[in-house]
Image (cartoon, helix red, strand yellow):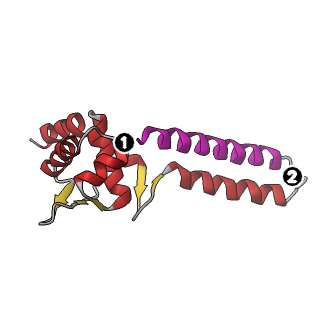
Amino acid sequence: MHSNCSEELQREVLGEYNTFRSYVYLLRKRRASARQVSKALGLSSTWLANHHLNKLERFGLVRRDEYGTFHVIEKSFGILKFFLITRRWIVPRSLFFSVAFGVVAIGFALRLSSDPLFPVLLALSLLGLGYGVYHSIQFYRLLP
């Protein structure tokens, strides 16, 4: 049953662009009305935003309060597993590797050494930095 629910979540939320956009918007804003979601995402009507938000509510990704405001419930699934979600930021996890390789590269560059292994280590740290930055940008582009 768990696999079925996961497949349905993938299809109904990640597979539908505006539903996923609505969830990402709420991850960033924390709460919003259907009207706010409709306006922010440029949807044709509040009814359409409500449709996507109701779908998110059905999967336990949002909760509607008595005033009709939707509050996000953070869950890591699909492509979102590659991101660290904070209060308002959605950051690719690969960015942390980029920072680490960047610090190492700076450390090597500042410590100009005559050791024959030095250029190899500097090159590897620069490659790691480039790889991490490239993938961070690629992951971030996947978000709506």
Q: Position of residue 87 (x, y in %)?
A: 39, 65
Vertically, is 121 above or below 7? Answer: below
Q: Mark 2 and 1 residues: CB-CB less than 8 Å, in contact?
A: no
Occupied quadrant, residue 6: top left
Vertically, is 129 above or below 138? Answer: below
Q: Is residue 136 magenta?
A: yes
Q: Which residue is mark 2?
A: 115
Give, as a single range, the part of the protein colored magenta.
Answer: 117-144
| 137 to the left or right of 129 | left
Q: Amino acid at mark 2?
A: Asp
Residue at figure coordinates x 34%, y 56% from the top left: 27
Occupied quadrant, residue 119: top right
| 6 to the left or right of 137 | left
Q: Amino acid at mark 1?
A: Ile
Residue at figure coordinates x 26%, y 34% from the top left: 16
Q: Residues within 10 Å of mark 1 (few under 14, many from 20)?
A: few
Q: Position of residue 82 (x, y in %)?
A: 41, 47
Q: Which residue is mark 1?
A: 79
Q: Is residue 120 magenta?
A: yes
Q: Position of residue 104 (x, y in %)?
A: 70, 57
In this rendering, does residue 76 appear at all? Answer: no
Q: Quadrant of the C terminus?
A: top left
Residue at figure coordinates x 88%, y 56% from the top left: 113
Measure the alpha-carbon separation of dots 2 and 1.
42 Å
Q: Nearer the viewer, residue 119 or 76?
A: 76
